């Protein structure tokens, strides 16, 4: 006879009410992985930070009292060094573009690492499995990254390009094409503001949906160990359309957790920054740095939690493909011989 408590627990798991908390606990339980990702992201941020530090050290070496420019550079300083500040801004801007590309590619690698850690039913050597998974699916996820950028560009064109202008402004609100930019013929400033808010809100919603779709598509690629990013993306979109609540609710809960803590840390950082401006206390810069690191840690952990949630939901609602399960219970190290539990055959995971 089935255990009623177990049936109730399975029902709760199936409807997604505990998926988010399970995912958060699973991500928190792998500190070696999220500390590795955190170290890499901090190293990326150090490049422009060191550029600013080196330039500021030279600019303030002999002409200013120590610590006098800590809280505020001042109008005189900015005027005297306007050429150097402009050159520094241009250089760090170009550096930032390159670092953004590296960060996106690193996101593809980290996604593979998280999914390997969550899908492989083994324990221990989490960092080794993370790097193995990151390398294993990197090129598949890189192709999916390109597809995601195309979809995001399409969303921007729909809401900020001709479709919005024709369908909403011209046909819906009777705005002539010559007034698409200024919207002076609407007759009410409040209508213009509301229209802009609705468009921005719709764009933000579409971006969130596309990013969630990307998480589930990466999970499907890893779960089935397939190669076609386009086919996985199409089938994932159909799955989300068929099960919107079960797929989107865990990610919504995790998003609200991220928003709550990061917003709170942001307000705290603003208060610390205000204290630096008012009183110029050097120790406050250490507090500000620790606050930023705490927010970054929380975001890295929640990123892993999203993949764990996607794995849980996908295992429940995604149909298996007509071939042996690549993630069945086996023994063996990453990339080596896999020995099924309860069987005589073995295989090598590729």
Image (cartoon, rainbow, N blue to C red):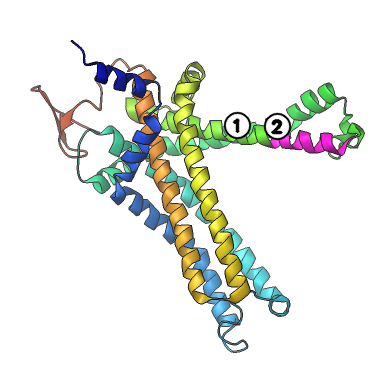
Q: Position of residue 343 (x, y in %)?
A: 10, 22
Mark 2, secondary structure of its residue? helix
Mark 1, secondary structure of its residue? helix
Along the horizontal axis of the image, is 235 left or right of 185? left
Q: Position of residue 302 (x, y in %)?
A: 42, 42
Residue 21 appears in which quarter of the rendering? Answer: top left
Along the horizontal axis of the image, is 13 left or right of 129? right
Asked if the stretch drawn in magenta spans residue 195, the answer is yes
Task: Report the magenta residues as a range.
Answer: 188-200
* Residue 113 in view (yes/no): no
Q: Residue at x 62, y 69 (%)?
A: 88
* Residue 124 in view (yes/no): yes
Q: Position of residue 190 (x, y in %)?
A: 83, 37
Badge 2: residue crowd in 10 Å (few <14, some 14–19, many ≥20):
some
Question: Label 2 belongs to which residue?
Answer: 159
Q: Residue at x 20, y 36 (%)?
A: 122
Taking 293 as reference, is 261 above or below it? above
Question: Label 1 belongs to which residue?
Answer: 206
Q: Residue at x 55, y 55 (%)?
A: 266
Q: Which mark is residue 257?
A: none
Mark 1 and mark 2: Cα distance apart in space: 10 Å
Which quadrant holds the C terminus?
Answer: top left
């Amino acid at each position: 006879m089935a255990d009623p408590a177990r049936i109730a627990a399975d029902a709760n798991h199936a409807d997604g009410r505990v998926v988010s908390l399970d995912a958060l606990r699973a991500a928190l339980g792998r500190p070696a992985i999220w500390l590795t990702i955190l170290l890499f992201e901090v190293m990326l941020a150090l490049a422009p930070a060191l550029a600013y530090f080196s330039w500021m050290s030279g600019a303030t070496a002999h002409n200013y009292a120590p610590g006098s420019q800590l809280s505020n550079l001042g109008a005189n300083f900015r005027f005297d060094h306007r050429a150097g500040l402009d050159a520094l801004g241009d250089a760090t801007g170009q550096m930032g573009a390159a670092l953004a590309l590296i960060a996106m590619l690193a996101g593809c690698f980290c996604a593979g690492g998280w999914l390997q850690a969550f899908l492989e039913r083994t324990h221990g050597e989490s960092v080794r499995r993370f790097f193995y998974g990151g390398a294993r699916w990197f090129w598949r996820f890189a192709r999916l990254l390109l597809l995601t950028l195309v979809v995001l560009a399409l969303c921007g064109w729909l809401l900020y390009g001709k479709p919005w202008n024709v369908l909403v402004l011209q046909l819906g609100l009777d705005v002539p094409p010559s007034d698409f930019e200024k919207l002076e013929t609407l007759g009410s400033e409040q209508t213009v503001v509301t229209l802009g808010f609705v468009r921005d809100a719709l764009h933000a919603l579409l971006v969130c949906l596309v990013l969630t779709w990307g998480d589930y598509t990466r999970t499907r690629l890893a779960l089935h160990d397939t190669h076609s990013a386009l086919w996985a993306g199409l089938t994932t979109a159909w799955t989300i359309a068929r099960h919107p609540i079960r797929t989107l609710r865990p990610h919504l809960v995790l998003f609200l957790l991220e928003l709550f803590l990061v917003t709170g840390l942001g307000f705290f950082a603003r208060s610390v920054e205000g204290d630096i401006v008012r009183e110029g206390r050097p120790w406050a810069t250490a507090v500000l740095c620790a606050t930023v690191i705490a927010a970054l840690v929380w975001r890295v952990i929640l990123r892993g939690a999203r993949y764990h949630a996607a794995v849980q939901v996908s295992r429940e609602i995604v149909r298996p493909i007509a071939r042996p399960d690549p993630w069945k219970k086996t023994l063996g190290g990453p990339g080596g011989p896999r020995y099924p539990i309860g069987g005589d055959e073995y295989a090598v995971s590729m």
